[in-house]
């Protein structure tokens, strides 16, 4: 699953640590999400969407949909 978490975080000039604190996870978790090594749980996805004020679909992108569009 691709995502725009890093771009959204950097646009706010937040460190990974700041974002992690704001959503209640470790900095390592944010790093793994940004690198595409970890797909966050639904509750975490919703916390990130709420924090950034964006719909989930504008932050996280399902590779399956991109591969199977007509």
Image (tube, rainbow, N blue to C red):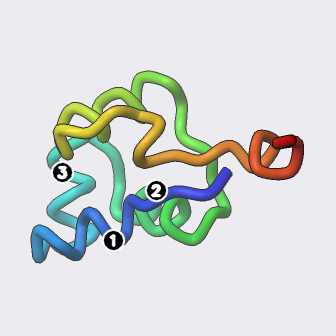
**Given this view, does label 1 or label 2 mark the residue nearer the observer?**
1
> Residue 16: x, y in percent?
27, 69
The residue indicated by pointer 3 is 21
Q: Secondary structure at mark 2?
A: helix
When asked about the image quadrant of residue 53, the answer is top left
> Residue 48: x, y in percent?
30, 40
What distance separates the C-alpha of mark 1 from that of mark 3? 17 Å
Disc 3 residue crowd, few under 14, some 14–19, many 20+, Cα 10 Å:
few
Asked if disc 3 and disc 2 are in contact, CB closer than 8 Å, the reply is no
The residue indicated by pointer 1 is 7
* Residue at 34 percent of width and 33 percent of height: 55
What distance separates the C-alpha of mark 3 from that of mark 2? 11 Å
Q: Which is nearer the N-term, disc 1 or disc 3?
A: 1
**Given this view, does label 1 or label 3 mark the residue nearer the observer?**
1
Q: Which residue reaches farthest front?
A: 70
The residue indicated by pointer 2 is 29
Query: Front-most of 51 and 40?
Result: 51
Q: Secondary structure at mark 3?
A: helix
Q: Which is nearer the N-term, disc 1 or disc 2?
A: 1
Q: Which is nearer the N-term, disc 3 or disc 2?
A: 3
Query: Front-most of 12 and 30?
Result: 12
> Residue 15: x, y in percent?
19, 74
What distance separates the C-alpha of mark 1 from that of mark 2? 16 Å
Total tally of numbered discs in the picture: 3
Q: Secondary structure at mark 1?
A: helix
Disc 2 residue crowd, few under 14, some 14–19, many 20+, Cα 10 Å:
some
- Indicate whether 20 appears above or below 42: below
> Residue 47: x, y in percent?
29, 31
* Residue at 21 percent of width and 57 percent of height: 19
**Relative horizontal placement of residue 29, taking residue 52 as reference (left or right):** right
When asked about the image quadrant of residue 40, the answer is top right
Asked if disc 1 and disc 3 are in contact, CB closer than 8 Å, the reply is no
């Amino acid at each position: 699953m691709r995502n725009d978490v890093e771009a959204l975080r950097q646009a706010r000039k937040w460190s990974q640590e700041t974002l992690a604190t704001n959503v209640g996870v470790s900095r390592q978790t944010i790093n793994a999400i940004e690198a595409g090594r970890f797909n966050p749980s639904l509750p975490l996805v919703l916390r990130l969407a709420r924090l950034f004020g964006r719909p989930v679909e504008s932050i996280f992108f399902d590779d399956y949909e991109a591969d199977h569009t007509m």
